[in-house]
Image (spheres, rainbow, N blue to C red):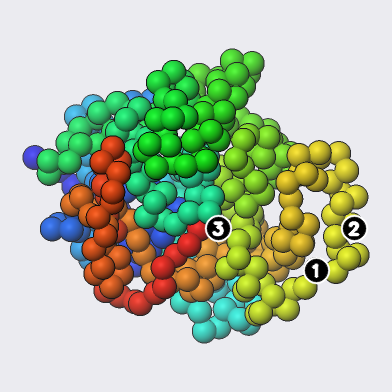
């Protein structure tokens, strides 16, 4: 029998549906009968995966549990405290950092949005899948990777849960043709090539795992060097690199700029990059060849100015405004169907892909979220 432990955190600080189903993490599945969110993750410093459950049946706390008998409840609670970044108060950021410097936050609710601390390798692959994609398909791809190339970790309510595959597992067992059949499209090539490069990089730097290698790079690099390195992997441009840095590497100041954030910047902040701005950035990036090749200088000026506007937790501010702009939640349930926000049922056509679904949230209406 599962033993649940509590973390005292209000919905104002953490709303599970808005954090686990809105484009940061893609492997949480929802048991609609119980309201439990389920995934696999590495607890603290363990390399083995465990099935982890969280639920939010109260406005003042969440509950966490695991099936792993080798993990104590304290281990799980400590890990989830770090995963949800509970050392950071979004309400304090709002009151002390953002609102005093930016009057536009006056009528904005935070909706329990916060940035997660995720595994760097899983975050990197997930956001390669995100290019020109939407959340339901990204979720489907990530689960397909796990069920085909990961290890089975456990079962919850007749649903099997798997580890996220390592670069070695993907490169040794997957082919571009297989991934295309699983629905990855042109991203199949990106994933295979990135897995191979990570394997080579790990060997060169004597790192024990994919995430250890990426964490070492992140901790020893400034933002520009880190982004340059991330963009050296096939399929990673500036926006994807920034998402990886923010959500998988703890770079709280990073502002990923997509079409939604660009619209916010131009419409609400009147940020319109000039030729002078672009010229200055070109000069700044003269020793960063990958950046000069891949970056959109207009969008990078916007990134820079929003970072200056919002400060050291600019990426969190971006998350709050992004959610306000596009709204809503989406994700996977344990049923074999996709349920969109208006209860529209869509059957996926690819049998190899382990059809997944999106849970409907009744709290607020929202358009379909598109990840650019």
**Other-residue count near label 3 (Cα within 10 Å), few / some / many at <14 / 14–19 / ≥20:** some
Front in this rendered view, residue 160 or 92: 160
Q: CA distance from mark 1 to mark 3?
A: 21 Å
Q: Is residue 261 left or right of residue 24?
A: right
The residue that disc 3 covers is 372
Mark 1, secondary structure of its residue: loop
Q: Where residue 47 appears, x then y in whole percent? A: 38, 25
Number of numbered discs: 3
Q: Where residue 289 appears, x then y in whole percent? A: 81, 38
Mark before the other along the chain sequence, 1 or 2: 1
Determine whether 3 is above or below 205 in the image.
Answer: below
Is residue 261 visible to the viewer in this orientation of the structure? yes
Q: Residue at x 39, y 30 (%)?
A: 178
Q: Is residue 337 left or right of residue 205?
A: left
The residue that disc 2 covers is 279
Q: Where residue 234 appears, x then y in whole percent? A: 62, 35
**Other-residue count near label 1 (Cα within 10 Å), few / some / many at <14 / 14–19 / ≥20:** some
The residue that disc 1 covers is 273
Mark before the other along the chain sequence, 2 or 3: 2
């Amino acid at each position: 029998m599962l033993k649940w432990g509590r973390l005292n955190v209000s919905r104002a600080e953490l709303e599970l549906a808005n954090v686990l189903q809105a484009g940061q993490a893609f492997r949480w599945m929802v048991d609609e009968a119980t309201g439990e969110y389920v995934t696999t993750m590495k607890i603290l410093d363990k390399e083995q995966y465990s099935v982890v459950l969280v639920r939010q049946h109260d406005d003042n706390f969440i509950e966490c549990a695991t099936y792993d008998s080798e993990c104590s409840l304290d281990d799980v609670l400590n890990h989830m405290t770090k995963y949800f970044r509970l050392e950071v108060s979004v309400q304090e950021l709002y009151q002390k950092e953002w609102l005093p410097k930016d009057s536009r936050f006056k009528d904005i609710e935070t909706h329990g949005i916060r940035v997660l601390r995720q595994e760097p390798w899983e975050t990197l692959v997930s956001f390669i899948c995100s290019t020109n994609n939407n959340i339901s398909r990204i979720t489907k791809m990530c689960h397909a990777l796990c069920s085909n190339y990961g290890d089975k970790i456990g079962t919850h309510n007749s649903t099997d849960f798997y580890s996220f595959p390592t670069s070695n597992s993907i490169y040794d067992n997957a082919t571009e043709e297989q991934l295309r059949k699983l629905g990855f499209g042109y991203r199949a090539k990106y994933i295979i090539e990135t897995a191979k490069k990570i394997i080579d990089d790990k060997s060169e730097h004597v790192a024990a795992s994919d995430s250890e290698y990426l964490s070492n790079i992140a901790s020893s690099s400034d933002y520009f060097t880190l982004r340059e390195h991330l963009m050296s992997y096939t399929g990673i441009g500036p926006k994807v690199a920034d998402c990886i840095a923010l959500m998988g590497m703890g770079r709280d100041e990073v502002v990923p700029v997509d079409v939604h954030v660009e619209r916010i910047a131009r419409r609400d902040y009147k940020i319109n990059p000039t030729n002078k701005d672009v010229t200055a950035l070109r000069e700044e990036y003269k020793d960063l060849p990958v950046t000069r090749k891949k970056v959109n200088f207009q969008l990078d000026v916007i990134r820079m100015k929003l970072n200056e506007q919002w400060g050291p937790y600019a990426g969190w501010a971006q998350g709050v405004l992004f959610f306000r702009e596009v709204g809503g939640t989406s994700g996977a349930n344990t049923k074999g169907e996709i349920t969109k926000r208006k209860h529209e049922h869509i059957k996926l056509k690819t049998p190899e892909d382990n059809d997944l679904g999106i849970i409907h949230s009744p709290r607020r209406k929202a358009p379909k979220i598109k990840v650019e």
